[in-house]
Amino acid sequence: MNKKTKLILTTLLVYGIPVILWSLLPFSKNLWGTWTDSTIFNFISYGNYVFRPIGIITDVILFYCLFILFFKKDIDFQKERVWLIYNGVKKIFKWIFTDKMKKDPEVSREEKISMLFYLVKLYFTPVMLNFLIGNWLSLSGSISALNSMGAFTMDEKSILKIYFPAILHVMLVIDTIIFSCGYLFESSGLKSIVKSVEPTALGWLVTLACYPPVNDLTGRVLGWYTSDFSTFSSVNTTIIMGIVSLLLFGVYVWASIALGFKASNLTNRGIVTKGPYKYVRHPAYASKGISWLIMGIPFIIKFGMVAIISLLGWTIIYFLRALTEERHLSKDPDYVAYSQKVKYMFIPGII
């Protein structure tokens, strides 16, 4: 068996098994679709396009196999991420079933990083693609609403119900495209090779608490007393606060653009020092958190201490995400140097 065939079969095995499982399990099947819900298979079978997360992932896997077959020249199995995943998982199974866990598993550092990154990809790729599709559909709805207006008007209803959501959905589409690409692709040419992955349970827990399906449980415990755009005591205040929220989300998306192909949770893919990262170390958390706190003011007025506790709980979760990231990234000398230069985590001159 030549190297290309071996790498293609390993790719289909490592990434194909989760795709098949996602396509069979009721929860993931209903939420993310199946491997036959892909643009390739639907176009061949029905002559139309269907966008579902598992279908997109299937297409990416198939295109990557074609890339290996026709374009990949040098194959070094010791550097191929998919081979390191396969080898690491094989050693773990051997350790469990053959060695009976009597000695430490002989898993290399690169294999450990690869398996952890594999878990990151398995969890976040369909979630982020689902966000992308949802934001795209919402943006399409906003565009339809704009088209149906006929003439450009600046009345209260148009601003709050059409213009603000349309601007926000444009930004969220950009953000989710960037992060989807970050989870799907890793390449030295893109300067997005994973150097390390968050090793602690706390780091994983506080991150997963913010994403489906775990955030459903978090929401049941803490509640959700804020909004992208809340209604304040007057129309003028509502519009001004809406503009402030959009500006803060603009910083959030600016941070995603600065990350580029390095964008993904729980990983170190090289330190980013441009964009808003020139001023604070966690601009995305800061901008999103401040926006939610501002938009939570009407909820505090209405619900009182319950809303305050909820907002405080979510703020603590994001603060813990930042702290666990600091601990993880501080093992990288580049980040130590960066944190000495950029001293503030969230707000310049304050914290």
Image: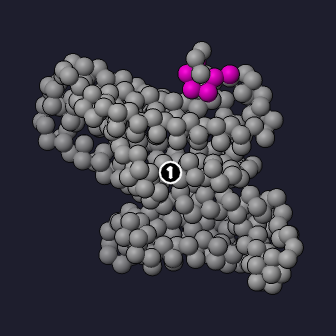
Q: Report which quarter residue 184 is drawn in.
A: bottom right
Residue displayed at 85% across by 77% down: 102
Q: Is 85 in the magenta?
A: no
Residue displayed at 62% across by 75% down: 12
Residue displayed at 27% across by 28% down: 301
Q: Quadrant of the C terminus?
A: top right
User: Residue 176 location in percent, x, y?
Assistant: 46, 47
Q: Is 345 in the magenta?
A: yes
Question: Considering only vertical position in the picture, is 146 above or below 246?
Answer: below
Question: For the view shown, which residue lies furthest in the front direction?
Answer: 305
Residues in magenta, as a range:
343-348
- Confirm whether residue 203 shows in the render: yes
**Which residue is at the front of the view, 310 or 281?**
310
Mark 1 — residue?
209
Q: Report which quarter residue 69 is drawn in.
A: bottom right
- Confirm whether residue 4 shows in the render: no
Relative side of 175 to 160, left or right: right
Relative side of 33 to 9, left or right: left
User: Residue 234 location in percent, x, y?
Assistant: 19, 20
Q: Judging from the image, what secondary structure is the residue with disc 1 in? A: loop
Q: Amino acid at mark 1?
A: Ala
Q: Residues within 10 Å of mark 1 (few under 14, many from 20)?
A: some
Residue displayed at 30% across by 45% down: 139
User: Residue 161 location in percent, x, y?
Assistant: 20, 36
Question: Considering only vertical position in the picture, is 62 above or below 228?
Answer: below
* Count of numbered circles in the view: 1
Q: Quadrant of the N terminus?
A: bottom right
